[in-house]
Image (spheres, grey):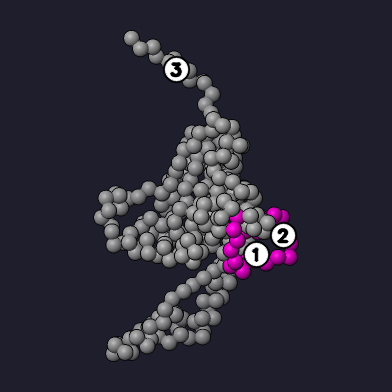
């Protein structure tokens, strides 16, 4: 007969840190990108399940949608306050643009020496195809109700008024991004230095600029804070049934190409 270990319901367990992996581009959709809708269940569980001592964010993102970046960050901050839990961010390859926006959800930001951080700016890119359709003998026809309804049509000549409107929108988004960084990093940012030009920095330089706090990786840093017996539980976005069986190959391939292009901007 095998002896059974007695069940002791009040035996103290080692401390738990729940880890949320935030890897990929940030965009609305279900093709593997990071967005509030797909991440919400994982984030909610990470803050509420198992009585964690802290929540760690492991970030590897070149950015994407400012709206989704803000929604995800706001959800993390709300749950951190409601549950009175510290949040730590650990940057892997890159936390740039919207990826850095996510990092500002943390109370402390850690990075590898070779991590890329920053890119606090706004970018919009497209193509002008007017010459191409003329060569093909194609005539573009657009009808609108409202003079501002059609804007930056790639099949029509670029209009200065459209560019002006776009830049005004970008400035508003940039202002929101800067306000988020200032509100979260506060007096850690050096006075009189413009960190909001869209520039990027590696780990130690980012620390000098106040955009990160220390060089560190998730496991050793959490052991340093909560002891060698600290436990980890990983959370992240779940792939839908179709995606798991590879039945959305075309959509996933397109998403992969888009993501590859975003990482390539940072030499990754």
Relative placement, left or right, of 112 versus 49 is right
Q: Residue furthest right?
A: 191
- First in residue order: circle 2 vs circle 3: 3
Q: Secondary structure at mark 1?
A: loop
- Residue stretch in magenta: 181-203
Residue identified by numbered label 2: 190
Give the quarter of the image for residue 211.
bottom right
Residue identified by numbered label 3: 7
Residue 184 covered by magenta stretch: yes
Q: Secondary structure at mark 3?
A: loop
Q: Position of residue 124 (x, y in %)?
A: 49, 72
- 37, above or below 198, in the image: above
Quadrant that contains the N terminus = top left
Q: Residue furthest top?
A: 1
Relative placement, left or right, of 249 versus 30 is left
Residue drawn 59% across the image and 53% down it: 113
Which residue is nearer to you in this view: 101 or 37? 101
Number of the front mark, 1 or 3: 1
Residue drawn 54% across the image and 52% down it: 91
Dot 3: few (<14), some (14–19), or many (≥20) neighbours within 10 Å? Answer: few
Residue identified by numbered label 1: 195
């Amino acid at each position: 007969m095998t002896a059974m270990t007695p069940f002791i319901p009040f035996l103290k367990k080692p401390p738990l840190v729940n880890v949320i992996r935030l890897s990929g581009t940030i965009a609305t959709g279900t093709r593997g990108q990071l967005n509030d809708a797909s991440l919400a269940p994982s984030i909610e569980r990470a803050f509420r399940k198992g009585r964690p001592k802290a929540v760690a964010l492991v970030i590897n993102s070149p950015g994407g949608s400012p709206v989704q970046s803000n929604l995800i960050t706001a959800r993390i901050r709300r749950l951190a306050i409601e549950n009175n839990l510290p949040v730590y961010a650990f940057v892997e390859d890159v936390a740039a643009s919207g990826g850095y926006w996510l990092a500002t959800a943390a109370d402390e930001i850690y990075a590898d020496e070779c991590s890329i951080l920053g890119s606090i700016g706004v970018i919009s890119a497209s193509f002008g195809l007017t010459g191409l359709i003329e060569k093909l003998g194609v005539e573009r026809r657009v009808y609108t109700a409202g003079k501002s309804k059609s804007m930056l049509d790639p099949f029509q000549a670029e209009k200065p008024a459209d560019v002006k409107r776009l830049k005004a929108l970008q400035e508003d988004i940039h202002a929101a991004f800067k306000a988020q960084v200032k509100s979260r990093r506060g007096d850690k940012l050096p006075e009189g230095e413009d960190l909001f030009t869209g520039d990027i920095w590696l780990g130690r330089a980012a620390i000098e600029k106040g955009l990160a706090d220390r060089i560190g990786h998730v496991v050793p840093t959490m052991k340093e804070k909560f002891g060698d017996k600290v436990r980890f539980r990983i959370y992240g976005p779940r792939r839908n049934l179709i995606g798991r069986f590879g039945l959305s190959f075309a959509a996933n391939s397109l998403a992969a190409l888009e993501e590859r292009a975003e990482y390539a901007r940072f030499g990754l």
